[in-house]
Amino acid sequence: MVLTVLTPDVEYFKGEIESIKVPGVSGEFQVLKNHAPIVSALSEGKVKVKTTDGKILQFRINSGFIEILQNNVSLLVQGITE
């Protein structure tokens, strides 16, 4: 699965991942390989990414959207704090 994390100013991350947990507006949810296509609004909160080499990347977002389509995950957020 390929994740791209974008803010209005910069591409924060792009790479292969195993999973991602995001703060949806109705609660936190996790995305794994072969997830059904969706677009969802995100609220302020913590994002946790597990890369294919086993590393864990964590950061906070202000708000945004996630789109999942054919194992490509796009995270479009207003701002990121580490």
Image (cartoon, rainbow, N blue to C red):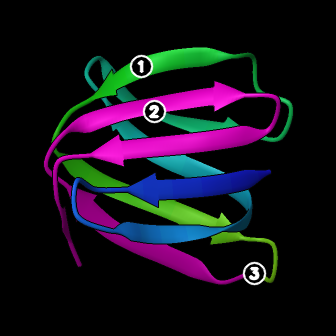
Q: Which mark, residue 40?
A: 1
How busy is the neighbourhood of tag 2: few (under 14 within 10 Å), some, or many (20 plus)? some
Residue 54's x, y, as percent?
A: 75, 81
Circle nearer the N terminus (2, 1): 1
The residue that label 2 is drawn on is 66
Q: What main secondary structure does the magenta stretch of the protein show? A: strand
* Location of residue 17 (image quadrant): bottom right
Residue 71's x, y, as percent?
A: 80, 38
Mark 1 and mark 3 in contact? Answer it, CB < 8 Å: no
Residue 71: say if magenta: yes
Q: Which mark, residue 54?
A: 3
How far, Cα to Cα, is label 1 from label 3? 26 Å
Mark 2 and mark 1 in contact? Answer it, CB < 8 Å: yes
How far, Cα to Cα, is label 3 from label 2? 22 Å
Report the span colored magenta: 54-82
Mark 3 and mark 2 in contact? Answer it, CB < 8 Å: no
Question: Does residue 28 appear to the left or right of 38 in the view shown?
Answer: left
Circle nearer the N terminus (3, 2): 3
Amino acid type indicated by mark 2 = Ile
* Location of residue 6 (image quadrant): bottom left
